[in-house]
């Protein structure tokens, strides 16, 4: 069969297509309106007054200008996504480092250096469109590649496993986690009875629960989290040979989290925290990057892993199958219009291109139905692929016709295939071997509505995850379970959860149970309940470093540092440290008692960016308190400034004080490294003498790179 399109497309040079999507979107874009017209193009004479029978008389039905304006307004909203309603998106490109021709025939994965335009949408899962960004939740990580062979969507999450094993349970899971149906509370939170009731009866959720109770579920930034395709997919090469594959996105800025108290406060102080962070980074030219990683497994070796690759509650430890980095994704352009792009984008795990195929994962199989179906009600009909954001950069043609909001004008007499009237020949016009070839997996078995016994191991990878966490991370997981379960009114539900946890780790279960007013965890009781399975797999490893987020240090690009000032601040040493931070890519903001200026110790004016109140410490990664006796005294006397520093300390952030700034710390009861016998990790004190400044600046940069300083004692006692 003929395959003309594909061949001519392939001849395009690598790199040519990166701008193709932007160019296409431009043709649909419109700038600000200067001369108002109706949607029919009729000039509007007066956009302030409706047409009335006399200036004080009733408005006339005849006023088509008013009617059109109000009617359009009345219909501006579309249904929000049934899950992942809150999200934010950006454009960019994917660039291949390493040809994957050995594994796949996918065009965009052949030529080293080839750039493919992408659109990415990050999301939370449970909350509504207007909910807060920093809630405890899974984050969606959906990437649309506009390839020359059609759109490929990798619709993943920031957690590599899922709650349930079969799509049949997805609606129940979502009903359980969403606000409870009788009073529609709580918003964007899993800390309520119906969620824990459901998961406690579904032990297969245990592995994912460990991830969701960990710091992974409260990322510091969308730019600082991993992404995963979750399911096992197939790559199929030109000879038809398949490999199983797991997809990973590795953030160049490292993986980092907020602390829970901070996340909750940010939800109130700036509900758009993650959205703003991504927007500002791209706007300022700090383009976030992720590397695409693959775990490739020969089909014949899949069995030897010891667990079932079709089970989406399992990951493949990187120690067992290393992740090969094959390319990078750069997000370099914000949207022009949130609704047109981010809201109308329609992802679908079933949008694949030749050379990428599905596996029989029963969760994935259900998804293949769900995503088109949901767009029909969300986007109002079957032509959503014609919306500018969803259009491929290659042409599409078939005999699907008509329907709501059709835009293409299909010419001619023929809307069927085969035909001779249009082609003049009796030849078929489908692609044959040039088209998508489904992997010809042999299947010979009776129809059954059952779960495979190879899906029965519900705990060994949950234990692996637990064993892989640092002591601080373990504490956070325990605290998260305690917090969530403390919001569960029914004691029997709390009890069932800790009984299940006893199968992950005895100490974890005991610790979680301690403040919950229930009995000791009872592993036997869990094992006696319906649905319980524990076909534990013997894994060849006890722990896996890749599962932890603990870092010994990393880049500080785009980290935000508050320079806390008041009148009398001494700026000599401050400027040296500030310059070192800027050189390392950090963003410094001067935070003072009011907007405008503060006066420095040398009588100059220092511009203030924010106040202690309008930009509190939770908006920053680190704090610098410059020298200056008057400034230190003024800060110590200001409750908001005091709270600022105490809160940063409580959230384990790096604090650097210079000269007299240390007096502020002392007055707050914080002992700094080098200044007192008791050392507080990540609190640096520098003299303002010139010789000490450079070293201090270097130490400060290194300390911020550690992200947080978990070694601080008695943080719970800090009143912030
Ligand atoms: Fe889903 C949206 C990711 C299981 C049904 N899903 C959605 C989005 C992401 C995921 C990132 C948002 C896309 C966007 O930004 O527009 N979903 C996942 C992952 C899953 C998963 C990683 C498991 C591994 N999902 C899943 C199942 C079903 C769905 C099992 C149904 C059987 N998901 C949907 C949906 C959504 C959706 C209802 C809502 C909005 C949309 O599709 O476009 O169809």
Image (cartoon, rainbow, N blue to C red):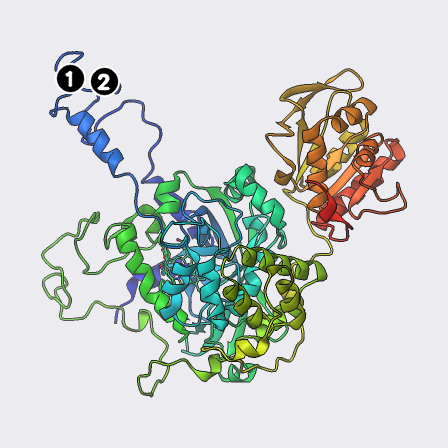
Report, in whole angstroms, how far the alpha carbon at label 1 lies from the one at label 2: 9 Å
Q: Which residue is drawn at 52% across and 63% down?
A: 491
Under circle 1, the secondary element is loop
The residue that mark 1 highlights is 52
Q: From the top left corner, tell me how far across and down residue 101 is, in percent.
A: 48, 70
Q: Can residue 326 be seen in this view?
A: no
Quadrant where the C terminus sits is top right
Identify the disc placed on residue 515: none
The answer to whether the beta carbon of the residue marked 2 is less than 8 Å from any atom of ligand 1 is no
Q: Judge from the rendering whether residue 444 lies leftward or rightward of residue 505; answer left or right.
A: left
Q: From the top left corner, tell me how far across and down residue 526 is, in percent.
A: 53, 76
Q: Residue at x 15, y 20 (%)?
A: 59
**Which quarter of the rendered image does ligand 1 occupy?**
bottom left
Do the CB atoms of the residues marked 1 and 2 lie less than 8 Å apart?
A: yes
| Rendered image quadrant of residue 285 | top right
Under circle 2, the secondary element is loop
| Rendered image quadrant of residue 476 | bottom right
- Label count reads 2
Q: Which residue is drawn at 49% across and 59% down?
A: 157
Quadrant where the N terminus sits is bottom left
Q: From the top left corner, tell me how far across and down residue 214 is, in percent.
A: 60, 59
Circle 2 residues within 10 Å: few <14, some 14–19, many ≥20: few
Q: Judge from the rendering whether residue 68 lies leftward or rightward of residue 670; answer left or right.
A: left
Q: Nearer the viewer, residue 418 or 249?
A: 249
Does 518 sit above or below residue 684? below
The residue that mark 2 highlights is 49
Q: Is residue 451 visible?
A: yes
Q: Nearer the viewer, residue 154 or 516?
A: 516
Q: Which of 592 and 260 is in front in this view?
A: 260
Circle 1 residues within 10 Å: few <14, some 14–19, many ≥20: some
Q: From the top left corner, tell me how far across and down residue 369 is, in percent.
A: 31, 65
Q: Judge from the rendering whether residue 593 lies leftward or rightward of residue 682; answer left or right.
A: left
């Amino acid at each position: 069969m003929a395959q003309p399109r594909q061949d001519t497309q392939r001849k395009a040079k690598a790199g040519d297509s990166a701008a193709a999507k932007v160019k296409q979107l431009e043709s649909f874009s419109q700038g600000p309106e200067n001369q108002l017209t109706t949607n029919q193009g009729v000039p509007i004479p007066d956009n302030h007054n409706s047409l009335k029978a006399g200036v004080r008389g009733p408005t006339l039905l005849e006023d088509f200008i008013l009617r059109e304006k109000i009617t359009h307004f009345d219909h501006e909203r579309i249904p929000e996504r049934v899950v992942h309603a809150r999200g934010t998106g950006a454009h960019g490109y994917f660039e291949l480092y390493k040809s994957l021709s050995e594994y796949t025939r996918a065009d965009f994965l052949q030529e080293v250096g080839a750039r493919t335009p992408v659109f990415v949408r990050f999301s939370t899962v449970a909350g509504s469109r207007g909910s807060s960004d920093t809630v405890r939740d899974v984050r969606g990580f959906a990437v649309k590649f506009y390839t020359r062979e059609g759109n490929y969507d990798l619709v993943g999450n920031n957690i590599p496993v899922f709650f349930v094993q079969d799509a049949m349970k997805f609606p129940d899971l979502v009903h359980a986690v969403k606000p409870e149906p009788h009073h529609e509370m709580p918003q964007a939170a899993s800390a309520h009875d119906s969620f824990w009731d459901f998961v406690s009866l579904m032990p297969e959720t245990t592995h994912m629960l460990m991830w969701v109770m960990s710091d992974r579920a409260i990322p510091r930034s969308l730019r600082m989290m991993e992404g995963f395709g979750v399911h096992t997919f197939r790559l199929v090469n030109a000879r038809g040979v398949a490999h199983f594959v797991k997809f990973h996105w590795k953030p160049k800025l490292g993986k980092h989290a907020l602390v829970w108290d901070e996340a909750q406060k940010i939800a109130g102080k700036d509900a758009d925290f993650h959205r703003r962070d991504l927007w500002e980074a791209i706007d300022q030219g700090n383009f976030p990057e992720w590397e695409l990683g693959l775990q490739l497994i020969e089909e014949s070796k899949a069995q030897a892993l010891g667990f079932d690759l079709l089970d989406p509650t399992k990951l493949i430890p990187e120690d067992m199958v290393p992740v090969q980095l094959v390319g990078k994704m750069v997000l370099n352009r914000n949207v022009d219009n949130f609704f047109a792009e981010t809201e109308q984008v329609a992802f679908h795990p079933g949008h694949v291109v030749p050379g990428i195929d599905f596996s029989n994962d029963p969760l994935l199989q259900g998804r293949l139905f769900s995503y088109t179906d949901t767009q029909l009600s969300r986007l109002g009909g079957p032509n959503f692929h014609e919306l500018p954001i969803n259009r491929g950069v290659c042409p599409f043609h078939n005999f699907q016709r008509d329907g709501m909001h059709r835009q293409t004008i299909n010419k001619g007499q023929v809307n069927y295939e085969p035909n001779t009237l249009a082609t003049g020949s009796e030849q078929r016009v489908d692609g044959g071997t040039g088209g998508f070839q489904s992997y010809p997996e042999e299947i010979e078995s009776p129809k059954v509505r059952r779960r495979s016994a190879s899906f029965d191991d519900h705990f060994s990878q949950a234990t692996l995850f637990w064993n892989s966490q640092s002591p601080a991370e373990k504490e956070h997981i325990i605290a998260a379970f305690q917090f969530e379960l403390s919001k569960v009114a029914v004691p029997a539900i709390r009890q069932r959860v800790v009984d299940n946890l006893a199968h992950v780790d005895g100490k974890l279960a005991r610790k979680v149970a301690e403040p919950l007013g229930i009995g000791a965890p009872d592993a036997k009781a869990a094992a006696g309940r319906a649905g319980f399975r524990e076909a534990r797999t013997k894994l060849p490893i006890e722990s896996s470093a890749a599962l932890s987020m603990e870092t010994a240090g990393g880049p500080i690009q785009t980290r935000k540092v508050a320079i806390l000032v008041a009148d009398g601040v001494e700026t000599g040493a401050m400027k040296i440290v500030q310059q070192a931070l800027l050189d390392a890519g950090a963003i410094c903001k001067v935070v003072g008692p009011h907007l405008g200026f503060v006066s420095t110790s040398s009588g100059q004016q220092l511009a203030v960016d924010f106040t202690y109140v309008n930009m509190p410490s939770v908006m920053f990664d680190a704090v610098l308190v410059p020298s200056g006796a008057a400034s230190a005294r003024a800060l110590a006397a200001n409750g908001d400034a005091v709270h600022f520093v105490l809160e940063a300390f409580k959230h384990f952030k790096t604090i650097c004080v210079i000269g007299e700034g240390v007096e502020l710390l002392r007055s707050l009861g914080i002992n700094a490294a080098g200044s007192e016998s008791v050392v507080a990790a990540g609190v640096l004190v520098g003299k303002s003498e010139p010789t000490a400044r450079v070293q201090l600046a270097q130490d400060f940069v290194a300390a911020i790179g550690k992200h947080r300083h978990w070694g601080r004692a008695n943080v719970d006692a800090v009143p912030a």
